[in-house]
Image (tube, grey):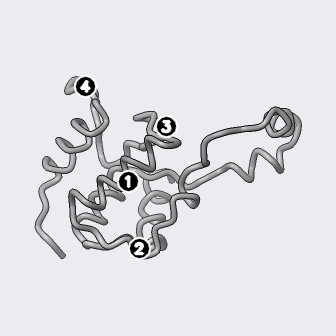
Amino acid sequence: MRAIAWERLEAWVRKENGTSPKKLITRDTQLYNDLDVDGDEAEDFMEHFFEEFSIDYGDYNFDHYFVPEGFSPLEIFLLMISKKKRASYDRPPITLGMLYQAALDGRWDCARLDSLSSLSQA
């Protein structure tokens, strides 16, 4: 395990995302729901995260955590009427705690990190 201070990750997230110093962010803060990081922004954010903290991508897969950008009118209609279709867009959230743990480990491990996210939501 590497020695990386939480404050370093927090400062980097604030700078990378343009998050106000007044906004409270914690290990439970979610990229999508709390910091509005999604789509192409999310792809860039995560790429910069892996580079900044020298993290091995491991089994990281963008589509596991984020819905790609762009919807057709038919898809939007189906989302409105179909629970099954809406469920297909559900993704586990990435929390700052997950990012911090990946930075400490030096590697992305979906099973380990996803379990951290589910613990914080329990």
Which residue in the protein does label 2 denote?
109
Which residue is located at x 48 percent, y 64 percent? 114
Asked whether disc 2 touches disc 4, contact meaning CB atoms under 8 Å apart, the reply is no
Between the C-alphas of marks 2 and 3, the distance is: 22 Å
- Who comes first in sequence, dot 1 or dot 3? 3
Q: Quadrant of residue 18?
A: top left
The mark that comes first in sequence, 2 or 4, is: 4
**Residue 66: x %, y % from top left:** 55, 51
Picture disc at residue 54: none
Crowding at mark 1 (Cα within 10 Å: few <14, some 14-19, many 20+): some
For the residue marked with disc 4, what is the amino acid?
Ser
Marks 1 & 3, CB-CB < 8 Å contact: no
Sequence-wise, which precedes: disc 2 or disc 1? 1
Is 115 placed left or right of 89 in the picture?
left
Label 2 or label 1, whichever lies nearer to me, is 1
- The residue to which callout 3 is attached is 33
Query: At label 3, which amino acid type do we have?
Result: Asn
